[in-house]
Image (spheres, rainbow, N blue to C red):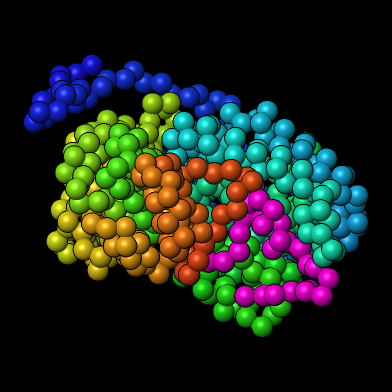
Amino acid sequence: MAELEQRGDLTPAPSAWEYAEAPESRDIVKLEERYGLFVGGEFVEPASGEYYETIDPASEEPLAEIPQAGPEDVALAVEAARDGFANGWSAAAPAERAKYLYRIARILQERSREFAVLESLNGGKPIRESRDVDLPLAAAHFFYYAGWADKLEYAFPHRRPKPLGVAGQIIPWNFPLLMLAWKIAPALAAGNTVVLKPAETTPLSALLFCDVLRQAELPPGVVNIVTGDGRTGAALVKGDVDKIAFTGSTEVGKAIQRELAGTGKKLTLELGGKAANIIFDDCALDQAVEGIVNGIYFNQGHVCCAGSRLLVQESIYEPLIEKLKRRLTTLRVGDPLDKNTDVGAINSRQQLEKIEELVAAGKEEGAEIYQPPCRLPEKGYWFVPTVFTNVAQSYRIAQEEIFGPVLSVLTFRTPDEAVEKANNTPYGLSAGVWTEKGSRILWMAERLEAGVIWANTYNRFDPASPFGGYKESGFGREGGRHGLEPYLAFDGVEASGG
Ligand code: NAI
Ligand code: MG
């Protein structure tokens, strides 16, 4: 333990803890030099002939070569998915589909350390999070939807649910395997087949997942994985699919919605957010500080539902900010594979540049910046956990999604004012409320325009709980019984595209 720091009349706190290195071994992960596209149950070379390098964002070290699938490759994958749908999957006994989903869930559990290390290696997130959050939740999603596969008639009584056909699924880089699970598990449970495109910076866990599918003996063509950047995603949207499920930026979500308008293809969009985490003066303050930290620094703030706008009741503003700043000095930023790391690497250079640009705008517009003393590794992409105080609602850092470890603090006096400020955003994905009063939680929840509202906690996920947004955060729900609906057609309601 290092020297004690004296701050006003507060209890002295250690200003730094020294930790021995505790690296997770990466030997458990065996990487190929070059991967193929997973089509019809086999790895195939891309017809495009193009590859790109995927890297470790913590070291910028190249990890493997990944196919950049072109329109022809995407068409082949969609055809394989059509065959898979026609040749047995759609007509399989529902309990048979459940069997495969249970197998996948169990194999993910068995191989969870391997997946966790790979996820941290390719994405930059701390091993503590990939191990304790991403992997258990990914397996839980498969277990959960396995349970629904043979109960669809009960989930939607008198509506005669049936599968749509082929689902095209496009996912982002912040929770690569977990977003894959959110997409694939309900689609298969409902009897569809899938073509999934992982994000260009984080394809490796989706490619390792193909090995899980083989182990589970999933019939060929039921799940196909095509890698590549936005061009591959665009080709999938244009392809012969019956549904698109997209998670990513609002900008791309809008483009997809325009593309699909009038086609009859179903669409769900899970886009960005600028959530308010609202702290009332009667809350348990230390607990709230932990919730604030978890809300914005979890996964480097690369979280669509991150609590990126902190709304603090004026009467507790000073003690709260004091405690928060002190807590920030204890966050450990560094090697994602170190078990002591709290904040890992920024996912890509592009994302780092976006964060830097918005932080510069925050300073320029007049907000006050606080960053704890912090030594960053020389190579790789890093950003120090940051708090902005003195933020006006009109500032870009209060309006735009930063998608990094950067918190903007605003204040309020009354619950009405808190609601007004919280809803003053084009987004509406999530919110947090911290108060001792149950009645106030319900009062707030009724008025906040957000798909998910956490009370006295933050960033808690459960496969049984639906997740999704309002306004520019998108539409459709993932998780829970609600999450099945976008993958089903009902008697008399064949399609309801975006
Ligand atoms: P993006 O929306 O460009 O990428 C998400 C996925 O969409 C990736 O798989 C990408 O290859 C694909 N894609 C890109 N262009 C496409 C197109 N025209 N048609 C079909 N698919 C396409 O997001 P990006 O550029 O990685 O991040 C930009 C910002 O978006 C972030 O800074 C963050 O604010 C937000 N974002 C929000 C996410 C969320 O969870 N809601 C996830 C990722 C990013
Ligand atoms: Mg983009």
Q: Is residue 84 visible?
A: no
Among the 4 quarters of the image, the one containing residue 396 = bottom left
Q: Position of residue 61 (x, y in %)?
A: 43, 40
- 113 sits left or right of 377 in the view: right
Among the 4 quarters of the image, the one containing residue 76 = bottom right
What span is in magenta? 474-498
Q: Residue at x 46, y 60 (%)?
A: 446
- In terms of depth relative to the viewer, which is nearer, 261 or 419? 419
Q: Position of residue 470 (x, y in %)?
A: 50, 66
Q: Quadrant of the C terminus?
A: bottom right
Q: Is residue 332 above or below residue 446?
A: above
- In terms of depth relative to the viewer, which is nearer, 424 or 327? 424
Q: Is residue 209 above or below residue 498?
A: above
Q: Is residue 234 visible?
A: yes
Q: Is residue 240 magenta?
A: no
Q: Position of residue 324 (x, y in %)?
A: 25, 39
- In terms of depth relative to the viewer, which is nearer, 352 or 487? 487
Count of labels in the image: 0
Q: Position of residue 306 (x, y in %)?
A: 41, 51
Q: Residue at x 36, y 21 (%)?
A: 21
Q: Quadrant of the N terminus?
A: top left
- 123 sits left or right of 394 in the view: right
Q: Residue at x 19, y 48 (%)?
A: 315
Q: Is residue 251 above or below residue 172?
A: below
Q: Is residue 490 magenta?
A: yes
Q: Residue furthest front?
A: 439
- In terms of depth relative to the viewer, which is nearer, 330 or 149? 149
Q: Is residue 497 above or below residue 187?
A: below
Q: Residue at x 52, y 28 (%)?
A: 26
